[in-house]
Image (cartoon, rainbow, N blue to C red):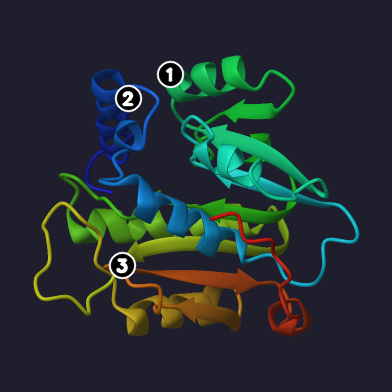
Amino acid sequence: MSAPKSYLEIARHYEACLRQHGDTHLGVDWPNEKDAYLRYQVMLEVIRGTLDTPVSLLDFGCGTSHLYEYMQRGSWRQVEYIGLDISPEYVKLAQAKYPDIAYYCVDILAYDEAMPEVDYVVMNGVFTEKRGLSFAEMWEYFQRMLTSVFRRVRRGMAFNVMSKQVDWERDDLFHLSTDLLFAFLKENLSRHWVLRHEYGLYEYTVYVYKTSHAAVLQYNVPYTG
């Protein structure tokens, strides 16, 4: 990157949203609650197979744990939720709401060993905004993050980015070509991925799995919408 830890600009932006809007969808910079719920469901569908046996799920960039709130509306007893965020402000608020949940406040690019090993990781909204970063800076940050996270994943991970199949692109958002993304995944992480571009928002979600077996298992996730 051209400046050390320039990605911290993104974290500072989200903290400003929290101070302005509090513990709401606007406090994590989602423009409306309905679309936020849709994103939660799409993220959770990274889980493949049945929920007959416990699995662990790390909410990377958990904010104030709105995903966990969404999960509480359904049958998720077999999913161990863990939260992680780079922002002390978000983690402090989330931990106060859910004192029995394990939370990590860490910059994994500085301390990657501090991230626990889990079955699944979801990264909802971590890469949708690039703020003042150039595309090159954001692309480098994105690659470093996915590489670090995937090392700690046993089964699969999910993330979303802004689509390039839009009428116009915003300079502060991270619109990523699927050709560029898939070349990176194939060369560096895995050949086993699923693209979700059908759910009606100006973004897409990708599930990346460790093995082809993990990728093709039918998911059986309770809908909580």
Q: In the displayed image of the protein, which residue is found farthest to the right? A: 53
Q: Which residue is mark 2?
A: 18
Q: Is residue 144 found left or right of 24 in the rendered image? A: right
**182 up-or-down from 120: above or below:** below
Q: Which residue is mark 3?
A: 201
Q: Residue at x 29, y 47 (%)?
A: 32
Q: Nearer the viewer, mark 1 or mark 2?
A: 2
Provide residue 36's location: percent of width, then percent of height.
Answer: 40, 50
Provide residue 147's location: percent of width, then percent of height.
Answer: 54, 59
Q: Nearer the viewer, mark 2 or mark 3?
A: 3
Q: Which residue is mark 1?
A: 89
Quarter residue 189 falls in: bottom right
Mark 3, secondary structure of its residue: loop
Mark found first going from the N terminus, 1 or 2: 2
Mark 1, secondary structure of its residue: helix
Name the amino acid, label 2: Leu
